Amino acid sequence: MKRLWHWPLDPGCRTVRLALEEKKIAFDAKVTWPGATISELANLPPGSDLPVLLDASGEQKIVVSGTHAILEYIEETDATPRLMPLLAKDRAEVRRLWQWSETSFAEVNRSLLAERENQWVRRSKQSDTTRLREGIHALKSKLGFLEGLAGVRTYMAGRTLSLADLSIAAHLSAYDYFGDVPWDLTPDLKQWYARIKSRPSFRPLLADKVEGTRPPRHYADLDF
């Protein structure tokens, strides 16, 4: 049995959920506020943060926290299907784009995504329009790079689905939950996202509903 504590709108948590679904690993999902104490896991190591995975399928219970640690763990323990290529040079490209996704989108997470959550989830009385503008500008600047990749590659890191695709798609899906991705500006990226979005692993994300929010109609539409 595996259990995952996660926050539905967090891109890192979404990446882990996609990977678990792609590998058809059964797990029990527990929605948890970022920074909240997980009562079932009282002895988490210092610095642990969402997502947190408990693997109780073996003789010894194993707890893994953090997006990278969990993804590496399930790739090593559940090798099929592979989300990291066999060849070292191809794995290097996956890791390059996976790191790019985590690093580049961090700016968008701190501004646009955080402000949207303050607006709709935490019901902040006053929006920070400056942060919203900064976040939207930052997001658009990242989309140009991804549009170029999507125009020449089937998947972001090459010919097969990888952790790079899942990370990028997870981030975009979190922004798209609030209708903040200008898909009309990136037709090739939109086509790539539609293909990823149509995978069975994406269905739980498209079914997400966070109290106080309502995603736009196109969010769950496979032919958006």
Image (spheres, grey):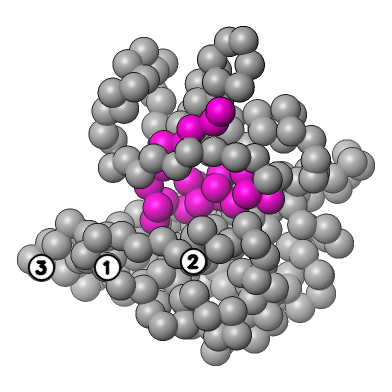
The residue located at (12%, 62%) in the rendering is 124
Secondary structure found at label 1:
loop
N-term-proximal mark, 3 vs 1? 3
Q: Which residues are magenta?
A: 1-22
- Residues marked 3 and 1 touching at CB (< 8 Å): no
- Mark pair 2, 1: CA separation: 14 Å
Q: Which residue is mark 3?
A: 126
Closer to the camera: disc 3 or disc 1? Answer: 1
Q: Tell me: residue 60, above or below residue 41.
A: above
Q: Which residue is mark 2?
A: 206
Write down the quadrant of residue 73 in the picture: top right
Secondary structure found at label 2:
helix
Q: Amino acid at mark 3?
A: Gln
Closer to the camera: disc 2 or disc 3? Answer: 2
The residue located at (52%, 72%) in the rendering is 141
Secondary structure found at label 3:
loop
Q: Amino acid at mark 1?
A: Thr
Q: Residues within 10 Å of mark 2 (few under 14, many from 20)?
A: some
Question: Residue 119 in magenta?
Answer: no
Residue 19, visible in the rendered structure: no
Q: Which residue is mark 1?
A: 213
> Where residue 91 sits: x, y (%)?
81, 43
- Mark pair 2, 3: CA separation: 28 Å
Q: Residues within 10 Å of mark 1 (few under 14, many from 20)?
A: some
Q: Tell me: residue 198, above or below residue 94.
A: below
